[in-house]
Amino acid sequence: MSDTHQLLAAVAIVAIVLLLNKAQESRRDSRHGAFWTAIPQAGVSSGRLLPWVHASLRSLYSSAETATAGYEMFCKKQDKPFAMAHAAAGAIIVLPPSRLPAISLSDDKILALAAQNDTLQPRWTSGGRAHLYQHPVLHFDVVRKHMMRDVSAFAAATDEELRMALRGCWGPRSPNEDWRTVDVWDTCSRIISRAANRCFVGLPLCRDETLLEQSRSYANAVYIGAGVITALPGFMRPVVGPLVALAAKRYLTGSMKVLVPFVEERLRLWHDGGGKDVPNDALQWMIERCSKAGPGEMAPECIAQRLLILNLVSIYTTTYAFSNCILDLYSSPERDEFVAGLRAECTQVAGESANSQGGFPTADAVKRLYRVDSLVRESLRVSAFGIVALPRIVAPGEGLDLGFDDLPSVPAGTRLGIPLRPIHMDTANYHDPMRFDAFRFSREFENHEGIIRQATEQKLSVDISETFLTYGFGKHACPGRWFASQIIEQAVAHMVQEYDVECVGKPEKKTLLNMVMPPMNNKVRIRLRDRSCYDRMNVGSFDL
């Protein structure tokens, strides 16, 4: 986090503690006293002066500890929800696993989109087009319709783009170069940005250096800035929000300068050709979806920004997952065993590929990377995006009845969440859950009988359940997870085949409120394994 963001966060802390929290505590007691008296509380010490003020301050850095304690005491032992402090929201009601279905209730009971938009804060980061994030969310319609059905069609393109981008970012820069040190987050975001944009806008724009730099910087600025804004009390956001979002707006402008003319040209081709002979990419799907929504949605600026929203969500979340795969794998004490097993599988699958250059250019090839998929799922388990996640808000009205005889309805406007990290680290759900085990989900199939069952029985990285919630749960589960998983697995497969990797120092996971921050300060040392292929790499052509 930059010095500016740290300063703004410090200002937010002071403002929250001095101006907001005590007032929220009073409102909780006076308006819905019966509920707040009945709900168990975690991390709120009644013996302290201003207990909710103290708990809210601690929530900035100790939410993981509080959530785990509340989960063990109330969710597991009593099957009850509990309240925990949140510096900006005042309190979050954490639901036990038995109430997971509640997050999928209809919009007249539970608000999902409003809660999820907090992660992007579009009022401040969208450059005046916050309405694009509201219903109907046309860009997510595109994901739901195409990013499952058509994801296999992108396998060859993303495989090629990932290989080129990986070599362009990781090198080597010269035939005599041995080990070199690279920034994990920076290089992974460049690699993922290339692959994602290959599917969104196609060649040659997916390799446009200006678009790549501006769009990935926009993604980083939105998520980091939104994290700071989310930590602010509501009355401060109109003042501080625009300042925090300045970087996001700058990168948004830079991205739009490239995208809008491209969209205008695509619209012309689409109209002139009567919708025939058009590219099969996300931009074309967006144009067709917007055309059905009416003329008001066909402005090139709106289409371009909807595409950019998909871009920023895809780049940030997929980079987050890929970066953590690298750090989890190569910081493990068992990394040599894991890497050897991954390489053996990747070599076998690549050798069986119909493509003479090997690689993983088909969805079928990717689906046979069972060990790689297990690694990705395990990394998503131990390095999920949040602590208390899947946020929801109780819809206006009479509140939400959770079905507990001794608990009144949850008041309208109250925030809800699921204890994602405690569930993922529960010994009742996983053996030795604190250990990163890359082959946790594939090991039982490592025999003749298991191979027969593997295709239908192995839990894959895209499979959600009551004990694996990184991609969500129920009707609001991430519809783009098949696309993300395919890209991550191809990237991991090329990485383990082509490079030796070592972590520089021990990776640490830092938290802010309920967010697990991305690994932006971690570095790795990398070395090309087969130096004889340097002359075939054409690194300069793809240097990012």
Image: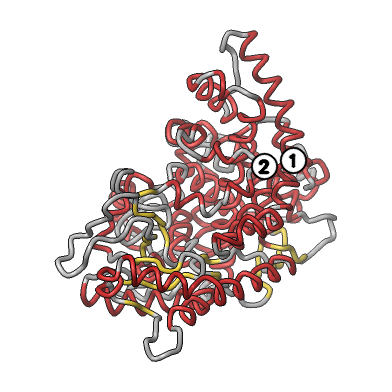
Q: Quadrant of residue 129?
A: top right
Amino acid type of the residue that numbered disc 1 sits on in the rendered structure = Thr
Q: Nearer the viewer, mark 1 or mark 2?
A: 2
Amino acid type of the residue that numbered disc 2 sits on in the rendered structure = Gly
In this rendering, the answer to whether 294 lies above or below 137 is above
Read off the residue under disc 2. Answer: 127
> Which residue lies at the image location 48% right of the left edge and 37% below the top edge?
140
> Which residue lies at the image location 55% right of the left edge and 45% below the top edge?
487
Viewer-closest of 436 and 243: 243
Label annotation for residue 115? none
> Which residue lies at the image location 57% right of the left edge and 77% below the top edge?
18
**Rendered-image quadrant of the N terminus:** bottom right
Mark 1 and mark 2 in contact? Answer it, CB < 8 Å. Answer: yes
**Residue 89 coordinates in the image, percent (x, y):** 47, 64
Viewer-closest of 228 and 517: 228
- Crowdedness of circle 2 by 10 Å Cα count: few (<14), some, many (20+)? some
Read off the residue under disc 1. Answer: 253
Viewer-closest of 259 and 368: 259
Q: Secondary structure at mark 2?
A: loop
Of the numbered discs 1 and 2, the one sitting upstream in the chain is 2
In this rendering, the answer to whether 118 lies above or below 340 is above
Viewer-closest of 127 and 66: 127
464 vs 214, left or right, is: left
